[in-house]
């Protein structure tokens, strides 16, 4: 088996997660989280649309972690984000973290907005 070391050049990966927290770049973050090429920040949850819209020019795909279980996004939220040109993929937060890390390692323009589990 061939192993390759992954180098993240444009953002920081999610190292781990647990009840109420995420660990990004070795630092624990409590509560909902937003991670993209400009760093990490608190996220106000599914009602915080403006923060997500502000990434439309620098992000191609936004992974939205809906917590411990996969849930449908509110129709208005999905519509506004797609109209802004963001590709949206909603899934449970653990899956969103893993998928974000994989695409990030490929150098893709991705972001993660995740509710804690």
Image (cartoon, helix red, strand yellow):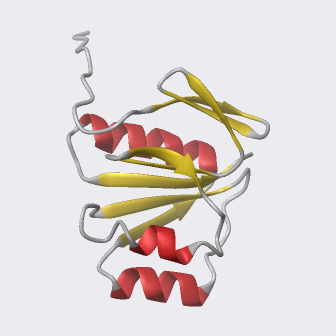
The image quarter containing residue 86 is bottom left
Name the spot of residue 103 as percent of width and height, x first.
Answer: 31, 44
The C terminus: image quadrant: top right
- Image check: 1 left or right of 19? left
Closer-to-camera residue (35/86): 35
The N terminus: image quadrant: top left
Count of labels in the image: 0
Is residue 48 depicted above or below 104 in this figure? below
- The residue that appears at 45% across and 87% down in the rendered structure is 80
- The residue that appears at 38% across and 33% down in the rendered structure is 12
Is residue 65 depicted above or below 71 in this figure? above
Is residue 65 depicted above or below 74 in this figure? above
Pick out the residue farthest to the right: 19
- Image check: 46 left or right of 69? left
Name the spot of residue 69 as percent of width and height, x first.
Answer: 72, 56
- The residue that appears at 61% across and 49% down in the rendered structure is 93
Is residue 88 depicted above or below 80 in this figure? above
- The residue that appears at 41% across and 75% down in the rendered structure is 53
Name the spot of residue 70 as percent of width and height, x first.
Answer: 66, 61
Name the spot of residue 21 as percent of width and height, x first.
Answer: 71, 36
């Amino acid at each position: 088996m061939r192993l390759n070391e992954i180098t993240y050049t444009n953002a920081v990966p999610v190292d781990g997660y647990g009840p109420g927290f995420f660990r990004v770049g070795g630092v624990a973050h409590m509560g909902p989280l937003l991670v993209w090429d400009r760093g990490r920040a608190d996220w106000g949850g599914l009602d915080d649309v403006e923060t997500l819209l502000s990434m439309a020019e620098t992000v191609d795909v936004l992974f939205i972690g809906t917590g411990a279980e996969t849930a449908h996004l509110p129709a208005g939220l999905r519509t506004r984000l797609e109209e802004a040109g963001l590709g949206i993929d909603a899934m449970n937060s653990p899956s969103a973290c893993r998928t974000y890390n994989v695409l990030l390692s490929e150098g893709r323009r991705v972001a993660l907005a995740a509710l804690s589990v």
